[in-house]
Image (cartoon, grey):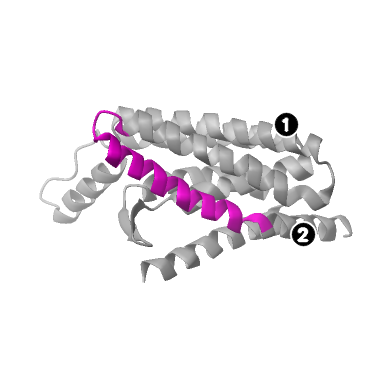
Amino acid sequence: MNEIYWFILLLSNFIFVLLAYKFFGKNGLFIWIPVATIVANIQVIQTIELFGMVATLGNIVYASSFLVTDILSEIYGRKEANRAVWIGFFSLIIMTVLMNIALLFKPLEGDDFSQVTYKSLNTIFSLMPRIVVASLTAYLVSQRHDVWAYHFWKNKFPSRRFIWLRNNLSTMVSQLLDSLIFTLIAFYGKYELNVLFEIFLTTYILKWIVAVADTPFIYWALKIRSKNDQK
């Protein structure tokens, strides 16, 4: 059943990206970036079995941010795509700081519900500094590379019929960097090398699948832009 839910989650993310763009235009894409980064860092704490592999949630919604920066790169240019990257980076820092300050408050004594919710929030948001550094570093490096690489390949293949090529080449390498940086910073020394490699490999494979699957949606975004231009 996990595989069915995974595909539902995959499709839902891409549809929400397009709906955000359809109803709110470029601002909708900017809105999606902090949504994706925050939700992904909450979902990632959940480990599941998927296609016979051990994986974490969060890969899909996080990978959807690469679709957004590619749409911004294609339609609005490098400056707007980089702006989205910094918005996501800033939102991730804000969430981490505010939620960890919130955990300093003592829950109401004698209130069982407050005690339970505090423990749940503590589990989710009391991130280890190493995980936070890994997440922020991987995000910034991979996203900045994605914007650079998209425009590198766009200069090489400027025709719109090659959007699929620049979308996939930029995203797949960026996802590789993201998975490698996060895995090494977060888990090196904590797991044996074979386990470390398995975590990296399964994470990248799932992100690679998402990168391939998002290709039709960037073309769909271009159609939405064309219809909006006609209004």
The structure residue drawn at horizontal position 35% and vertical position 39%, both measured from the top left corner, is 197
**Residue 131, percent from left and from top:** 34, 33
The amino acid beneath tag 2 is: Ile
The amino acid beneath tag 1 is: Lys
What is the secondary structure assignment of the residue under circle 2?
helix
Label 2 neighbour load within 10 Å: few <14, some 14-19, many 20+? some
What is the secondary structure assignment of the residue under circle 1?
helix
Residue 68 relative to residue 108: left or right: right
**Residue 60, percent from left and from top:** 49, 53
Tell me where the magenta segment starts and ends, as one range. 187-215
Alpha carbon distance from label 2 to label 1: 21 Å
For disc 2, the marked residue is 224
Question: Which of the numbered marks, if any, corresponds to residue 144?
Answer: none
Residue with the most extreme left position: 110
**Residue 61, percent from left and from top:** 50, 52
Q: Main secondary structure of the magenta part?
A: helix
The structure residue drawn at horizontal position 49% and vertical position 43%, both measured from the top left corner, is 37
Question: Which of the numbered marks, if any, corresponds to residue 79?
Answer: 1
Residue 207 colored magenta?
yes
The structure residue drawn at horizontal position 60% and vertical position 43%, both measured from the top left corner, is 171
